[in-house]
Amino acid sequence: GAQVAYETTSRQTPAHQQVWVLDGKIEITLGEQRHALAAGDCLAFELRQPTAYRNRTRKPARYVVVIVAR
């Protein structure tokens, strides 16, 4: 049931994010788009809109986030 949300502002240098789900399930919202991810899934995107991570279950979820700025 946990949720983490970030507002995104304009950046001089584009930032890219990649998320790998290790265990459980999470939902990632990018602006108005929602992506349901489960263990083994990966999602890559550019950080240019509000982003939120949410576990809609009672089971723990673990994921890795990598951010690269170019």
Image (spheres, rainbow, N blue to C red):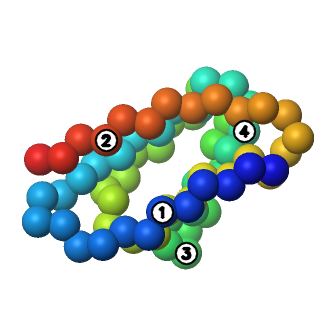
Q: Toward which corner of the image does residue 58 lie, by quadrant? A: top right
Identity of the amino acid at label 2? Ile
In this rendering, position of residue 60 left or right of residue 11: right
Q: Earlier in the sequence, mark 4 or mark 1?
A: 1
Q: Residues within 10 Å of mark 3 (few under 14, many from 20)?
A: few
From the viewer's side, name the closer residue of 6 and 34. Answer: 6
58 shown above or below 52: above
Q: Which residue is mark 4?
A: 25
Residue in the picture at 18% in, 47% down = 69
Pinpoint residue 62: horizontal percent, then vertical percent: 64, 29
Q: Residues within 10 Å of mark 4 (few under 14, many from 20)?
A: many
Q: Residues within 10 Å of mark 2 (few under 14, many from 20)?
A: few
Q: Which residue is mark 2?
A: 67
Q: Which residue is mark 1?
A: 6
Q: Which residue is mark 3?
A: 32
Q: Nearer the viewer, mark 1 or mark 3?
A: 1
Q: Are marks 3 and 4 in contact (CB under 8 Å)?
A: no
Q: Earlier in the sequence, mark 1 or mark 3?
A: 1
